[in-house]
Amino acid sequence: MKKGGAPPPPRPRALKAPPPSNLKATSKPPPAPRVGLGLRRRPGALAVSRAGLDRRKAPSKVKALWEDEVEEVLKAGEKRCASCGYKALEKKFCPACGDILVWWVKALRYTGYIVVIALAVTAFMNYRRLYPPPVLGPDGLPPKGGVELLTHQMKKEKFGNLVYIRGMVTNHSPVDFFYVKVEFDLLDGLGQVIGTATDQNPVVSSNAVWNYKAMILDPDARGYRNERISAVR
């Protein structure tokens, strides 16, 4: 090296050859990446998983199903009719066939059916108790049944000028009678019909007696005729 001269350039180092690769060349192209969102690998219903070795002393294999989370979410959000398959979101009844899509509506309908059937069975079982067959007398004929007008009399009240037709009604039957009504045609001094006097009772029980009192509103009434009684069983 001379004084005042430039330093000599460094010598290049010898490059080492890379170690031999154990990869084999292949003509197959690399697999293309899958297009999709949320792909994950998990064992499905057909997966076989068992630890250890099988009978042939070979490692056990696991079959996995590729499932798409986005597709699962979309399918889970769809509500389809079980009868016709029509897609009906957020609806209680199918627009196509009219079938019920909500479980609590079906529960209410079935509950109504059960209540109606129970009421019908109860009414059928109590029919004979509420409406027993007619009782026959010793002669084989039905005795005097229903309601009967026993007595009737035109009578003036002790205090005042009100006049009534009083009497008694009885119920011979083993069941109750409803809307029992007595009527009388009022007559004037010449025997002409000038009006009607009535009285009624909502219910007359079995073997009971009703003391009726039909008011006469016409002051010209001097008598009555054609007494009659009606009732509903």
Image (cartoon, grey):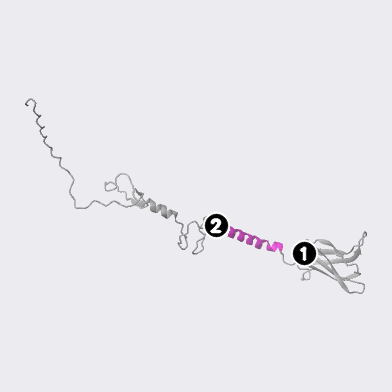
Q: Nearer the viewer, residue 130 or 109?
A: 109
Asked whether residue 113 is drawn in magenta, I would say yes
Judge whether 129 appears above or below 18 on screen: below
Q: Secondary structure at mark 1?
A: strand
Residue type pointed to by label 1: Tyr
Residue extending furthest top? 3
Q: Which residues are magenta?
A: 111-130
Q: Main secondary structure of the magenta part?
A: helix
Residue type pointed to by label 2: Val
Q: Residue under circle 1?
A: 179
> Percent from the top left, x then y, of residue 40?
35, 48
Judge whether 27 appears above or below 148 on screen: above
Q: Nearer the viewer, residue 111 or 169?
A: 111
Q: Residue under circle 2?
A: 105
Query: As drawn, is 172 to the left or to the right of 111?
Result: right
Q: Which mark is residue 169?
A: none
Asked whether residue 17 is drawn in magenta, I would say no
Q: Residues within 10 Å of mark 1 (few under 14, many from 20)?
A: some
Q: Secondary structure at mark 2?
A: helix
Residue located at (87% from left, 73% from top): 193
Query: As drawn, is 178 to the left or to the right of 63?
Result: right
Residue 170: which quarter of the image?
bottom right
Q: Nearer the viewer, residue 55 or 169?
A: 169
Q: Nearer the viewer, residue 194 or 134?
A: 194
Residue located at (83% from left, 68% from top): 183
Query: As drawn, is 16 to the left or to the right of 52?
Result: left
